[in-house]
Image: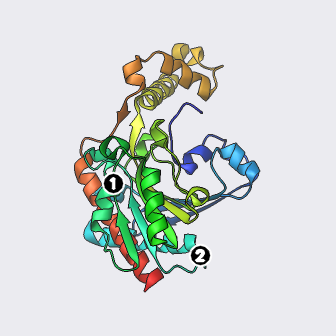
Amino acid sequence: MKNIYTDLALEERERFERNVEIKGVEIKNNYDKDIHMNTTVVDIVNEEGAKSMGKPVGSYITMESRVLKAPEETERRSIASKLAEHLLEVIQKDHVKSVLIVGLGNMQATPDALGPRTVKEVLPSEKVYCIAPGVLAQTGMETFDIVKGIVGEVNPDIVIAVDSLAARNVRRITTTIQITDTGITPGGGIGNQRKGLNQESLGKKVIAIGVPMVVSGATIVNDTMENLIKILSKTNNHCVANLFKDYTNEEKYQLFEELLSEETEQMFVTPKDVDEIVENLSTTIAHGLNEFCRQALF
């Protein structure tokens, strides 16, 4: 549904029926019972798949686990190791001698502070460069221009960008990490797109790590109405359900969206305990990045 904000390739895949094959798209799943983590790899292998998914050709790894929000130390280390493992898979046989880690977002806005807080906990060295460039409102400069300048100066082999994302499904908020080798467009998930950070624009391979921190108000209303229809159908109260039986999912979403006020439609919602969650997630991702750098660079 084109009006529903999401940065996750997995959610774009879920727009299609589960048993429908999408040409140019390959899916692999794995479940780790020790940390209750489901990992899905969505590979978009050609332009036909890219057009269907609305995402660039590349690999999208999605790690989903409820323990991501508030992991114990042992779980945090296990998740961090998995993250490092996936990052090593993404670079494959690339000969990496140095890396620039970019923490995207606004340190002063907690749901958008994941990137800057993560970078604070990454261990810099002569091979690992770290930067939190801030946002346009803070610096007066586009994020892309800052990062492009730094890339030109330090010439890293790869760039890793960490950012907050937006999701379509409420249950994925703060419980999902997406890793992709296609780069990232800051602000894309909330309709505030800036110039993208990717291999084409920076001349370097860009790996993006993101966690959905917000969901749109329109999505919450849509999901609530869908649940109401299901409940009424199960209780043999088909009056409301029958009203929507000929509507597609996209048509229902657009109808519910039209019922909202302009203020509600533009609203994005985040969990009430977001401060603690961001602290836990940034520490976990930083541990994973530190482990990745140790294995890839030293």
Q: Which residue is nearer to you in this view: 42 or 144?
A: 144
- Marks 1 and 2, how far apart in space? 26 Å
Residue under numbered circle 2: 92
Q: Is residue 108 above or below residue 122?
A: above
SS class of the residue under badge 2?
loop
Q: Is residue 265 above or below residue 214?
A: above
**Category of crowding for the residue at label 1, using alpha-carbon neighbours closer than 10 angstroms: few (below 14), some (14–19), many (at least 20):** many
SS class of the residue under badge 1?
helix
Q: Which residue occupies 60% across, 27% down?
A: 250
Q: Is residue 247 above or below residue 174?
A: above
- What kind of colouring is applied to the model shown? rainbow
Place of residue 161 in the rendered image (x, y in percent of width and height, measured from the top left): 44, 60
Q: Quadrant of the C terminus?
A: bottom left
Q: Which residue is nearer to you in this view: 153 or 85?
A: 153
Q: Is residue 124 above or below residue 165?
A: below
Place of residue 130 in the rendered image (x, y in percent of width and height, measured from the top left): 36, 67
Q: Amino acid at mark 1?
A: Leu
Question: Counting residues from the N terminus, which is met first, the one under dot 1 or under dot 2?
Answer: 2
Place of residue 139 in the rendered image (x, y in percent of width and height, measured from the top left): 32, 47
Residue 60 sits in quarter: bottom right
Please identify the residue farthest to the bottom as the structure is shown. 298
Residue 30 sits in quarter: bottom right
Residue under numbered circle 1: 114
Q: Quadrant of the N terminus?
A: top right
Place of residue 285 in the rendered image (x, y in percent of width and height, measured from the top left): 36, 64
